Amino acid sequence: MQRLKTTPFHERASALMQGAEWRRWGGYQVASCYEMIPDREYYAVRASAAMFDVSALAKYTIKGNQARPYLQKLLTRNIEKLVPGKVFYSPWCDSRGKVIDDGTVACFSEEHFQMTAAEQGEAWLRKVAQGFDVEIENISDNFGVLAIQGPTSRALLQELVGERISDLGFSEAAHFEVDGLPVWISRTGYTGDLGYEVWVASDRGLELWDKLVAVGAGYALTPAGIWALDVARIEAGLIMLDVDYLSALRAETIGQTSSPYEIGLGWAVHFQKGDFVGRQALLREKQQATTPYHFVSIVMDDVVYREAFQAAGLACDLPVKAWRGMHPLFDAEENQIGYATCGTWSPTTQKYIMLAQVKPELAEPGSQVFFDAVVDRFRHRFPCEVVKGPVFDTPRKKESYAKV
């Protein structure tokens, strides 16, 4: 019987678990929550620093003298300006222009790139690589990755690896050492906050964890699980595979698939770079304006929501843990105009927020839509407003700290 793999940090993570709240991600066992509820873990993201084990990300190296042309063919984004030390984010699509996965690509040299993805997809990468002089290696098990996210993350890492971390701009990366331990650090993350991702060889993962925890004690560093990460990424308006969209390789019908324009990634579709997988379909969609749904953030009227619970004699059930699932949305005439894919109470903004797909005519900020929820066994319809996303947007995410 095949078992879930454990990450390089599992020994330390499992020792901290209060309720054995594990989950499956990419063939790995990862923590949903270390404590019984994720409140303190979430607040660490916004008030100090949280440490997430994101080792389950699929990881690949792309090498060869045609590495860049290959990636230009694979990705929708133009990576011509992706130079050593930079990290770009991009989706990739099938020939119908439907998203297969999304992730980052980092440049080490003109013939050496590194990719991450939400899920394993090596077969597709090799399929697109036919005809290119490239070598693709799956290095998913070779490295552990800890995401250090939150306002004190830079100061923490500065004490750990030195002043040079302050020179690292948003979406930049470099090699460092932690007391002789080689690490690769990128200023990236999945929380919409100031944050970094620290890569280390798997066989030295526990060394890195211990050093981070020791230094992090002075910066309120808190190990955090996927539940806290989910709330933060919804606040930041960031999409998640199998929640906000299905991979085109696993969807059962074309209606279950999404183009980049449907999930808020139209900005990463660059036609001027030339041919890439899905280009013709995406160009046709843009020119003919046939995108059926737009990706938006919406805010529920929580006053009306609270009043419904009060009328039923119940305490208000605001979700401290984000929910996932396709929940229909309606217009004022009770026509279904889209669906919410996930939602949560946002402690930082004090709003009940959701990510959703709605028809283009209702995608403008200020548009009103309605969401159904059950209160004491009975369905209620609650008003929501489309807002300019993301609902949480802090300048420290991209702020420069380099000395001048």
Image (cartoon, rainbow, N blue to C red):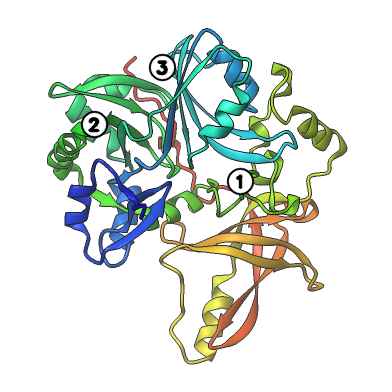
Q: Secondary structure at mark 1?
A: loop
Q: Secondary structure at mark 3?
A: loop
Label 1–label 3 contact, CB within 8 A = no
Taking the image as shown, residue 236 lies to the left or right of residue 160, namely: right
State which mark lies toward you, 1 or 3: 1
Q: Secondary structure at mark 2?
A: helix
Of residues 122 and 185, the one nearer the viewer is 122
Q: Is residue 393 above or below residue 400?
A: below
Name which residue type carries label 2.
Answer: Leu
Q: Position of residue 347 (x, y in %)?
A: 41, 61
Name which residue type carries label 1.
Answer: Ser
- C-alpha separation, residue under disc 2 versus residue under disc 3: 18 Å
Determine which residue is flagged by label 3: 85
Of residues 39 and 122, the one nearer the viewer is 122
Determine which residue is flagged by label 2: 157
Residue 202 lies in what quarter of the image?
top left
**Sequence-first tag of 2 and 1:** 2
Q: Position of residue 227 (x, y in %)?
A: 39, 58
Taking the image as shown, residue 4 lies to the left or right of residue 288, namely: left
Name which residue type carries label 3.
Answer: Gly
Determine which residue is flagged by label 1: 247
Query: In percent of the image, x 78 and y 71: which residue is there?
Result: 332
Query: In percent of the image, x 51 and y 84: which residue is there?
Result: 309
Q: Is residue 4 above or below residue 272?
A: below
Taking the image as shown, residue 194 lies to the left or right of residue 6, namely: right
State which mark lies toward you, 2 or 3: 3
Of residues 75 and 176, the one nearer the viewer is 75
Q: Residue furthest front?
A: 1
